[in-house]
Amino acid sequence: MTLKQLNPGQKGIIVDVRGDGILRRRLFEMGLVPGSRVQVERYAPLGDPIEIRMQGYFLTLRKEEAGMVEVACKEEN
């Protein structure tokens, strides 16, 4: 499952970041690294971009970028 497939309020743990080159490096620099916990906060009215919360801050990604981030969905109890 990718980050763009999570619904607002859903949480996940990053398991992989696909892609190559500058974009992948940029995602790593923003903190999107395997093992990080993320939560989708909201989607823009037209579905792009996506706002996520991770490590105490908010981050906005384009859907294309969010599709490169593989996550394991964390079920709520």
Image: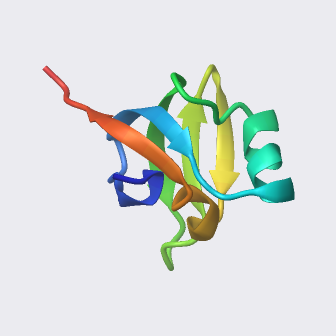
Residue 60 position in % (x across, y down)? 67, 52
Colouring scheme, one of rainbow, by chain, secondary structure, one colour: rainbow
From the viewer's perspective, is 38 left or right of 64? left
Which residue occupies 19% across, 26% down?
76
**Placement of 23 over or under 13, stated as above or below:** below
Q: Residue furthest front?
A: 20
At 33% across and 52% down in the image, what residue appears?
1
Quadrant in the rendering for residue 63: bottom right
Q: Nearer the viewer, residue 19 or 53?
A: 19
User: How many numbered marks have been drawn onto this rendered protein structure?
Assistant: 0
Q: Kindly give the residue lying farthest to the bottom in the view shown.
A: 46
* In this picture, residue 77 sits left or right of residue 32: left
Quarter of the image where the C terminus is located? top left
Reply above or below: 57 against 21: above
Q: At x 63% / y 20%, what residue is drawn?
A: 56
The one nearer the camera, 66 or 10, is 66
Q: Residue at x 71, y 31 (%)?
A: 31
| Residue 34 image position (x, y, % from top left) | 55, 29
Asked which quadrant contains residue 33, the reply is: top right
Q: Residue furthest left?
A: 77
Residue 50 in picture, x, y percent from top left: 55, 58
Residue 3: horizontal and vertical position, in percent? Answer: 45, 51
